[in-house]
Structure formats: C-alpha cells, structure tokens
Amino acid sequence: MSFEAWLAFTAASMVLLVIPGPTILLVVSYALGQGWRTALPMSVGVALGDFTAMTLSMLGIGALLAASASVFTVLKVIGAAYLVYLGIKLFRAGGTLNAEPRTDAVSSARMMAHAWLVTALNPKSITFFVAFLPQFIDRHTDFVTQMMIFESTFLALAFANAFGYALVASRARSLVSNPRAIRIFNRAGGSLLIGAGVATMAVRSGS
C-alpha cells in the first residue's frame, strides 16, 4: 500500500466522519443534556463500535478478495455506485440536526455501551464500510497489513471526531442547531461522496 493511498483514505475518512449520522446524533444528545463529561465515554464507545463494524466488513472483503479478483472488482464498482447514492441523498438532506438533549442520569459505562451498540449494530455502518474500503485496498499488497493500518487510522479519527462533537455540543450549542452550518456539512460531504464514487467508476471504465 502506497503512502498516497493511505493519505487519500485518511482525507476521505475525515470528511465522512464529520458528516452527522446516527452515532453523532447520539453523541450530541448526551453532550447537550449532560455536558462535556460525556465526551470520553461516548468517544470510546464510538471507536469500539466502528472497530466492530469495520472488522466484520474487512473480513468479508478479505474473503471476497481471496475467492476471486473479478468478484472484488465487481464489489468496487457496486461500492462506488453506492457512494454516489449516499452522496445524492446527503446533498439533498435538510439543514437540521435532530438531537434532543438526553437528561437521564446514566453511568459512563452505560453511555459507552450505548454508543457502541448504536455504532456497531447499525446495518448501514457495515454496508458503508463494504462500499468504502475497497476503493483504497490494493489487492496486490498484504491484506492483513492494510486492514490493520486502515482500522487504526479510522478508529483514531472516529474517536477524535466524536470527542470534538461532544465538546462543541456542550460548549457551543448554537452551532449544532444552526441550519446553515448543518446544510454546509451535508452539501460538502454529499459532493465529496459523489465525486469519490464517480472517480472510482471512471478509473474502472478506463482500465
């Protein structure tokens, strides 16, 4: 795996993580209701959930790669089309972040478990990873090494992103409820998803 591929994966992951989804809504809800103390347990739970979903996805991708290079290529094309679909859907999304403050008193362990469950058990997470990861995997390079590098990179970014959202929600509540800011996030993220999917399909058709 080249440094350029890792850099592209890192940049794409940073953009994708900042887009509000079910996990971020949960993080923001706890932070709005209980303040910055929720940041650490929620971030750990999110990272563990992403680790679970990403590992399951990578193992499935690895099995397909071992079975047939042609099947893996088909998966990349389908994944690219799925990214375009997600991008269009996100671009057309509204400018609201429906996160109601959670005021119920729960322990840090329960918050962490809640974040892990929401992140890991969301079928869309695994589907997304199956579509996203093959765009950066080099089938001529050791798969396990790539898996470890991609997972450690993504989990570090996921932890930092969730932690940042929790701090912003607890300190600058007006920002997470600002329709203009959310709309910018959605349109920028949607455009980048569409671009990534189209670029991948263009590369496949030209190869």
Image (cartoon, rainbow, N blue to C red):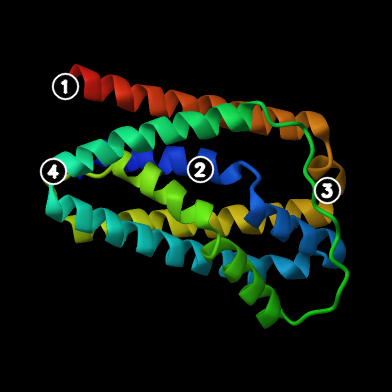
Distance in Å between CA atoms under marks 2 and 3: 21 Å
Q: Secondary structure at mark 1?
A: loop
Of circles 4 and 3, the one toward us is: 4
Q: Which residue is mark 1?
A: 207
Of circles 2 and 4, the one toward us is: 4
Relative vertical location of residue 1 with respect to residue 63 in this rendering, above or below = above
Q: Which residue is mark 2?
A: 14
Q: How many marks?
A: 4
Q: Are marks 4 and 3 in contact (CB under 8 Å)?
A: no
The three-letter code of the residue at mark 3 reads Ala
Badge 1: few (under 14), some or many (20 or more) residues near its Cα, within 10 Å? Answer: few
The disc, 1 or 3, on the residue closer to the chain's N-terminal end is 3
Q: Which residue is mark 3?
A: 172
The answer to whether residue 142 shows anywhere in this view is no
Give residue 69's mark. Answer: 4
The residue lying toward the viewer, choosing from 170 and 30, is 30
The three-letter code of the residue at mark 1 reads Ser
The disc, 4 or 3, on the residue closer to the chain's N-terminal end is 4
Q: Tell me residue 145's x, y (percent).
A: 21, 59
The disc, 4 or 1, on the residue closer to the chain's N-terminal end is 4
Quadrant position of the N terminus in the picture:
top left
Q: Residue at x 84, y 58 (%)?
A: 32
Give residue 154's mark. Answer: none
Distance in Å between CA atoms under marks 1 and 2: 28 Å
